[in-house]
Amino acid sequence: MTYLSNADIEQVILPSTRDLGGFSVRRALPAAMRQMVGPFIFLDSFGPVRFGVGEGIDTRPHPHIGLSTLTYLLEGELMHRDSESYVQLISPGEVNLMVAGSGIVHSERTPEHIRKDGGKLTGLQSWIALPKQSEETAPLFQHLGANELPTVNGEGINMKLLAGTLHGRRSPAATFSDLFSAEIQLEAGSRYRINGEHIERAIFVVSGAIEIIGQDGTYGPDRLIVFKPGAEIVVKASEAARFLAFGGEPLPEKRFIRWNFVATDQERIRHAADLWRERQFPGVPGDDEFIPLPDNFN
């Protein structure tokens, strides 16, 4: 559901809920009235989910093209494996960035040490569409520890820059266009300014409640707030709050998104689907399962 607000706020989006086989996610992008914010074409939030002994998440191997995935956990752990032979545990505060480019296959599963005793999981995953000239770049994977990410602390603010540039800081995450993604935590009453250095900007509220100075309303968890270009945005925490701020320069070409594929050309997506249907993508070492192409894909 999407509704319009006033002045410097362009849209406020309430995510849809998707069931991924016993595991629900809240999908803020793409939405009915908004496909992208800057190069970001997809945003899922998940959790908090609690697992009993022997339980966990099993996202079996599946393919991607034409995008980068950025995974960030708030609690719990996931094990990443991909067709480039990367195996990486991701923990809270770290970044897993996977550039699919011409094509990659990966899985995400609850690690055995969590599955043994039970545990929990909360996090965010966004997809970043690659510029047309980079759509067929070679796939790569990058893991960044929490201590490798630029931070700002003080005056009730804790900001961690996950990718791109913001306020003169740059994340070491590999990017291909102008963008930013930052996790921001504010103590109650604290303020954070998001200036107009990036054309398109949005905030996804994870917890707590925020206000936008000069605007009506308070926004709680699971609200995606999209701002008008050029607006000077000051966020105030009505109570202790945590949110993801992201955006960047919009890509000039239209993007098509079907299942796990993103491209400027629908024929490229059909070709990728045919390759996956025929099991022509590379496999994931150590993980022989796979997610079939959806029945309605044609």
Image (tube, helix red, strand yellow):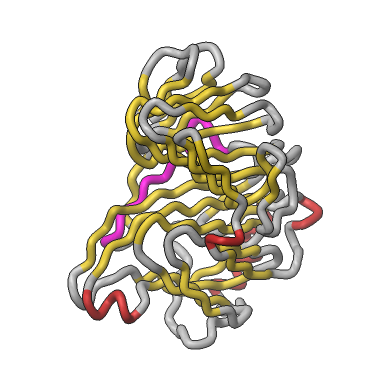
Which residue is drawn at the image coordinates 49% and 12% (left, top)?
A: 214
| Predominant SS along the magenta part | loop
Which of the 4 quarters of the picture holds residue 99? bottom right
Rendered location of residue 274, percent (x, y): 60, 69
Q: Against 24, is 153 above or below? A: above
What residue span does the magenta drawing correspond to?
22-36
Residue at 39% in and 33% down: 223
Position of the N terminus, as image quadrant, is top left
- Extreme residue in the left direction: 52
Tell me what residue is drawn at x 62 percent, y 20 percent: 232
238 in relation to 172, above or below: above
Kindly give the residue lying farthest to the bottom in the view shown. 286
Q: Is residue 246 magenta?
A: no
Most distant residue in the front direction: 154
Q: Nearer the viewer, residue 42 or 271?
A: 42
Residue 147 placement (x, y as % from top left):
56, 61
